[in-house]
Image: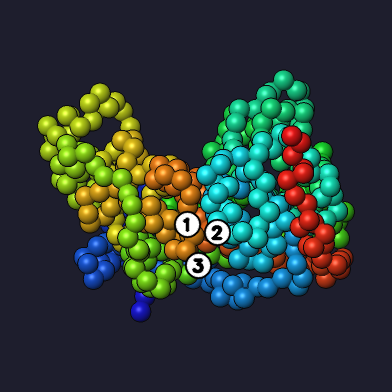
Amino acid sequence: MPTFLSITNLADLTGTSFATAQKWGKSGVYPLHKNEAGKEGFYMEELTDVEPVKMMLETNWDNEFKTTPRRHYTSVELFAGAGGLALGMHMAGFKHVLLNEMDTMACRTLRQNRPEWNVLQGDIHKVDFSSLRGKVDFLSGGFPCQAFSYAGKKGGLNDTRGTLFFELARAVKEIQPKVFMGENVKGLLSHENGRTLNIIRNAISELEYTLIEPKVLKAIMYQVPQKRERLILIAIRNDIYERGVQFKWPDPYKRVMTLRDAFFCGELFDTDVPKSEGQIYPSKKARVMSMVPEGGDWRNLPIEVQKEYMGGSFFLGGGKTGMARRLSMDEPSLTLTCAPAQKQTERCHPTETRPLTVREYARIQTFPDNWEFAGNMSAQYKQIGNAVPVNLAFAIGRALIRLFNDIDAIMPEKSEFEAANKISAEMIPT
């Protein structure tokens, strides 16, 4: 049976607008079909000249999923948050010897879910990583994006001072891992017309690492029911890169996952989403949101209700499609934010008039149901919304394990897991 792909999903995969993807169907560029629910879209098998779709049709996902490490590969994670990236890397086979995070609730989340992990809570500026030199294979971190200084003329490591990328770079310099990875928002590619990324490139070169050409990965291609995009930076130490090793990006999953996959028993989860706490709309807002159809937004409201609800935003330009937005059960979620009921980035449940619950949030980020989040409801939403989707991290992690297996075949080493794992909170001075 052919695999159905909605017009919206084709637009997301190709980075085009809904109108453009719709035009492809209406004009006959690609045959337009209707699924059992009467929704218009395409069959993936008839889109073989669309590169992202072709990749999904020809994927090597199943074989890549079987990847296992040749030995214990040790890792350090910075800016660990609630553990989305760390959990995905752990599932791939990395052994974390240190996770650093400043947020108290996120650290509690990490410790209660993985008591064996060495979670170091505190300001990264105060951490001395030099005791881990030569004991760690891999370092990763989703460094928060901050303004960069452009005082320097060349643009290199010195121009990253004052940013958290500089702290990641300092950790790399002190630890000297074989490979390190940074992840950030897609916007870093074009920030300051590309100059910010060039500064980072030069900084990585100064560290004597070779940067693999950065790539924006779309989470919907990696078994994540969410339209989230992350810029991934992977760098290999020069003495290793010169031995001829190659990094191969992970192949995508065979289809796009939807909220139906997230909320009900199926490929992603073996049970329906468990009940949990969640925000509640005030009665006035609930009345407005009840008028929005599945997949709709403020534009579907009666004109007078639009004006009342939107206020001054009604007269401003732009699509404002995040306002009064109700998600669709048969589409992936929009990118989650730190709260599900913000006026500009509404995330209303597809078929019930309420914000998404904490566990629905977690499933959209592909956290397992037994991964519990510490703190009050707002703290839990924030931790989940800031996370890297677990399945995306898992896919990247498997690709990195394959790289490390190749490195280990050329440069075999004994695992330093036990020695590295003895490092403790003494790394932060009191």
Crowding at mark 3 (Cα within 10 Å: few <14, some 14-19, many 20+): many
Residue drawn 54% across the image and 38% down it: 187
Left or right of residue 101: residue 380: left
- In the image, residue 187 sits, relative to residue 37, either above or below, namely above
Q: State the residue in front, 244 or 103.
A: 103
Image location (x, y in percent) of residue 165: 68, 37
Q: Is residue 222 above or below residue 130?
A: below
Residue depicted at 63% across the width and 66% down the height: 92
Q: How many marks?
A: 3
Q: Report helix, strand or loop for mark 3.
A: loop
Q: Can residue 94 be seen by looking at this rendering?
A: yes
- Residue 345 shows which numbered tag? none
Packing grade of label 1 (10 A; few <14, some 14-19, many >=20) is some
Mark sitting earlier along the chain (1/2): 2
Residue at image point 47% right, 63% down = 370
Q: Give me the disc on residue 253.
A: 3
* For marks 3 and 1 on the same chain, the one whose residue lies earlier in the sequence: 3
Q: Distance between the residues labelled 3 and 2?
A: 27 Å
* Residue bearing the label numbered 2: 113
Q: Position of residue 41 (x, y in %)?
A: 31, 62
Q: What type is the residue that disc 1 sits on?
A: Glu
Distance of mark 1 from mark 2, alpha carbons?
7 Å
CA separation in Å, label 3 and label 1: 27 Å
The x and y percentages for residue 208 are 83, 44
Inspect the image, locate mark 2, and give the three-letter code of the amino acid beneath it.
Asn
Q: Name the residue under label 1.
A: 372
